[in-house]
Structure formats: C-alpha cells, structure tokens
Image (cartoon, rainbow, N blue to C red):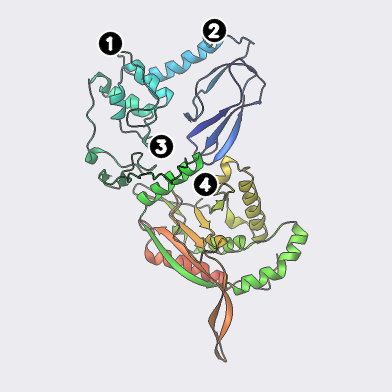
Amino acid sequence: MGESVTEATITNWLKNVGDSVAMDEPLVEVATDKVDNELPSEAEGVLIQRLFEVDDVVQVGDVIAIISTDGDAGPAESKAPATKVEVEVAEVTSSVQSNATAPQVTLEKNGSSGRFYSPLVRSIAEKEGVSLQQLDGINGTGQGERVTKKDILSFIDNGGAKQTSVATPTPTQQVAKTSAPATNGAVQTGGGFLSNIKEPVVTVGPNDEIIEMDRMRKIIADHMVMSTHVAPHVTSYVEADVTKIVNWRNKVKKSYADREGENITFTPIFMEAIVKAIKDFPMVNVSVSGNQIIKRNDINIGMATALPSGNLIVPVIKNADRLNLNGLTKSVNQLANNARNNALKPEDIQGGTYTITNVGTFGNVMGTPIINQPQVAILALGAIRKVPAVIETPEGDFIGIRHKMFLSHSYDHRVVDGALGGMFVKRVADYLEQFDEKREI
C-alpha cells in the first residue's frame, strides 16, 4: 500500500462469496488516507470467505479474504483454507497467556465509548475473556487511539484479563497521543489530557440541513485538529514584488505552451525559490519525534490542491531540488491533473517535507495555513495584485504600478523560532524579486 501506510478502509467489495476470481483481477476497493485503490487478487480460484466488511479499517498485513484454489466453492472450513486460518490464529495466540477458565464473550466492533475494535482485537478479547468494559479502559496506541494487537496482548500479559473490572484512568493518568486527535473531542497537550475542554453540543434548528461528512473530509478534519494540538503555530508575513516574474511569464507562456503542449504557471516558479531558501535554511525541512529533531536531507515539496468535491489533497514533488524549472513545471502539472482526475497513487501523497498552499487562487491576499504534520512549516501564497509602490532609483524615488503578493509562513514554534521562520520567508521573497527576466526555459 506504499511506504508508511499502516491501515486501509475497505470501501467496496468487487466480488461476492462464491464468485470465481482470476489472477490479478480486482477484488476489493480500499482507501488509504486520501487515495482510493483497487487491490488485485493474488490467486485464481473461488472466493469462499470475506473476513472484513465495507467501512472496516484493516491493518496492513491482515488477511481480508480466503480464496479456494482447488475450485471448491464450499465453506471456509474446507481443508486448504482451514489450514491457513489455523496458522493465523496460532500466530495470534502464541504470545497470549493461557487462560483456560476465561469466560467466552461476544463483542461488537464498536465499544460503549464509540471506539472501533478490529476483528483481530475482538477475537483475542473474546478468546481471553476480556470484557468490553476492560477494552474501553485500555490506552490504545494505534491511529485515533485504537487498541492494537500489541496493546491487548500487553494488557493480557500483565494480568488484565483476570481482573473482574478495570478502573477508567483519570485524565492525569492518560498519555497524550500526537499521532491523532482525541476521539471524544477533548484537547490533548504535551503533558496530559484537558478533559474539561470538549466539542460544543450543537442544536439543530427546524430550518437547518444536516450534511454528513464524507470520508475524506473526516480525515482532513482529524489531521487539522491533530496538527493544531501538537504544534504551537506562529505565522510570519512578507510582501514580495513579483513584477519581473509576471512580465517574464507573460513573455514566454505562449511559446512554452506551443512547444510543450502545456501551460507554465506561477507555482513551479515559486517552488523553485522555496527550494533555494530551504537549502539556505535546512532547519525548516525537519520533523519532530518526541525530543528528537529529524533533519530531512531530501527536499520533497507538497502542494495543496483543491479537488472538484471541495476537499483538499497534497501531492508531493520528490527531490524538487534536483529539477530545473521545466522539470518542476511538468511535475506540478502532472500531479495537479492526476489529483483532479482522482488518479493519484499512494506514493504520490507520501514523503513530503515542506508544503505550499496557493490561497491566491481564490483571491485571498494572505492566510494562516495549518502545518501538514509531521512537517514543521507551510507557506501560503497570496494573490498577485497590481498596487502603487515607491520605486527607488539612483535618480530618485517615484510612484509606480507593481505586481505584489504576500507570503504567509506558518511554522512549529517548538523547533522553528521567529528568527528562523522570518528569515526563511524573507529569503523566499528575495529570490522571487531577484528573478532573471532574461532566462530561458
């Protein structure tokens, strides 16, 4: 599913139990983060069991279906598949403490707290007699504080399954997670849980319309809330004179389109300046892991792109520092087109080290963008406007019409101080203003 992907959501089964399946034939549709994919079958035969249903969240490496390769469309208890099932169960139970007297329980996939429990976790809990109340009391280390296989095995190894009840941890006992926002609306901090701060209860009026968030909007919402909880945001602003860039683009855009068959936009030009500034100030190209700073030697620029649905996605240009302006232009155009046509691959949205977002597309002069975790900075590009400006010359100053724009640089104040954040965005403006109007592309 791509580097760093740990789980996926099943969005649609393309085959029913009893259907014949060919090798490499699409079997199921899944969604990882913001990208949808079809998974091909790894075998030829008959689908005899689906282990997960639509909307279930599945960990990478989980078995999701069983295919009989001997043409037997019978139940999953047939000899060949049963062997595979036994292997999977043995792998799970080998590290679980023996608890022969534990009562058998049947658990729903959602606990009383609303937290989702995977089939694997529920299976272990049922076998070991872990009650739903006990599950709800386990601090999950998975995404969205989900209980993972490791969490429940650790709970059982520590004698948790033998307890008749589990006390709910107090707010000060809970450990704040930085991988995802709190699922109950409480605010997380570096030192604990502020359980007294919760989402407001909203009253629906008689003339109001309720619109259910789609999957992508939920992911975006969770990611944005998590980022603001994890990183203290600071934003610095600089105004840049981009008259030279506007004049140069107006001069070359027709000949470039005729030669290359595509347009040259401002985005790759701005990206080129950002890459140069990152080389000058590499400590904005970092990530934070606990008390460690991870310095990224690759410069992978993400560009926030609006989709027809109104949602956002951030395709990434890998090793942007190795591309010239023509290469950046082609990469930007290709990723933007793929995003609009829902043709991005999982690797297209992974590995970003710095992000830009063009709020000027919507006529906005400036903005205060939220950092795209686990990065530590993001730059918003404002609208280019014609404004009166003081122009300094050896013969004296005069008022002229210039093309100007604001750059809004938000950064994580844990590791990027005001001096670094401010100098970086000023350096980007300097590179834009020093653009060579005579350059060739």
Q: Amino acid at mark 3?
A: Gln
C-alpha separation, residue under disc 4 versus residue under disc 1: 48 Å
**Measuring 30% from the left and 21% from the top, which residue is drawn there?**
131
Would residue 95 be seen by someone viewing this image from the given angle?
no
Q: Nearer the viewer, mark 3 or mark 4?
A: 3
Real-space CA distance between mark 3 and mark 2, rounded to the nearest whole angstrom:
36 Å
Tell me if label 4 and label 2 are in contact, CB under 8 Å.
no
Q: Secondary structure at mark 4?
A: loop
In this picture, is 79 found above or below 369?
above
Residue 79 disc label: 2
Tell me the amino acid under the disc marked 4: Gly
Query: Looking at the picture, how far across and down is residue 115, in whole percent?
Result: 36, 32
Q: Secondary structure at mark 1?
A: loop
Label 3 to label 4: alpha-carbon separation: 18 Å
Above or below: residue 16 compared with residue 37: above
Task: Report the quarter where the N terminus lies.
Answer: top right
**Spatial separation of the CA atoms under disc 4 and disc 2:** 43 Å
Residue of label 1: 101
Q: Are marks 3 and 1 in contact (CB under 8 Å)?
A: no
Q: Which residue is mark 4?
A: 351
First-in-chain label (3 vs 1): 1
